[in-house]
Amino acid sequence: MNLAQLISQARQMASAAAASGRRSVRVPIFSFEDWCELYMQPRSGPALAAYRTQAKRSWYLMRFLREMDVEAVPVPVTAEEFYAWAEATGHELTDSHSTAHAIGSYVNDPATPPARCMHTYPDIRLGPGESLATLTVYGESPQEPEVMTAVIHTADGRVITALEILAWDHSPQQAWEKTRAFLDRHQPRTVFHDQTIRPPQYCTACGALLVSVASAEDVMRDNS
């Protein structure tokens, strides 16, 4: 599935949830190891690509849900806890279809806890010149950027707040205008530009995009 299809599918899923009047959607989140065990996949290249597609789809889905004022609740699914639940509730796991159906039931069971780590930031307002900023572009290849992040952080790497801009929904000019306005609000001392297009990585507990900040070496050079 290419990126356009994946984004379209995630947006359609979010739109269907919003149109049905749902106020909250629980989204399963997996680590690679748990995903491979649950879906009986080898821990190899093709499985890793399929897992990354799953994680990416979940991230876009949660983002679109929130844009449509539907609460997106990430729910981590570990093989050990899921199998114990399936045995206790009498779910038969005979094939991938029955497993997927059971995972849906597990995630929507009120007794299943949602993710504890939500990657929220304190959004502390530092004074002009008291913070740093790092700009990074994420994508599976340089030819197809997906997200640009502008991260306000301290010199020791603590994230204060972050802006995520979807390349799919913004022209390069629109993205830079949003970024400039964001930086103008926070007035960082230095803006670091990551020169590498980085493959996106997602939290295996809550599915959030893991944002980047300037390295300690870059910050030290800036201070010298």
Image (spheres, rainbow, N blue to C red):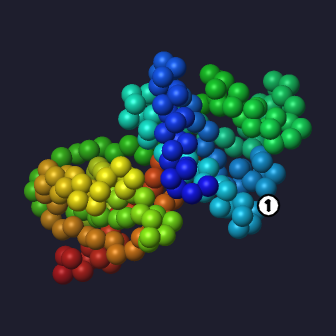
Report the number of numbered marks: 1
The percent coordinates of residue 85 (x first, y second) are: 77, 30
The percent coordinates of residue 215 (x first, y second) are: 35, 72
Q: Is residue 138 above or below residue 21?
A: below
Which residue is found at the position 40% from the left and 30% from the top? Answer: 68
The percent coordinates of residue 149 (x first, y second) are: 34, 57
Q: Is residue 133 left or right of residue 29?
A: left
The percent coordinates of residue 176 (x first, y second) are: 23, 59
Q: Is residue 158 visible?
A: no
Q: Residues within 10 Å of mark 1 (few under 14, many from 20)?
A: few
Q: Residue furthest left?
A: 128
Which residue is found at the position 28% from the left and 61% from the top? Answer: 172
Q: Is residue 212 visible?
A: yes
- Which quarter of the rendered picture does the N terminus lie within? bottom right
- Residue under pointer 1: 42
Q: In the depicted view, which residue is nearer to us: 126 or 149?
A: 149
Which residue is found at the position 29% from the left and 57% from the top? Answer: 171
Amino acid marked by disc 1:
Pro
Element class at badge 1? loop
Q: Is residue 219 left or right of residue 58?
A: left
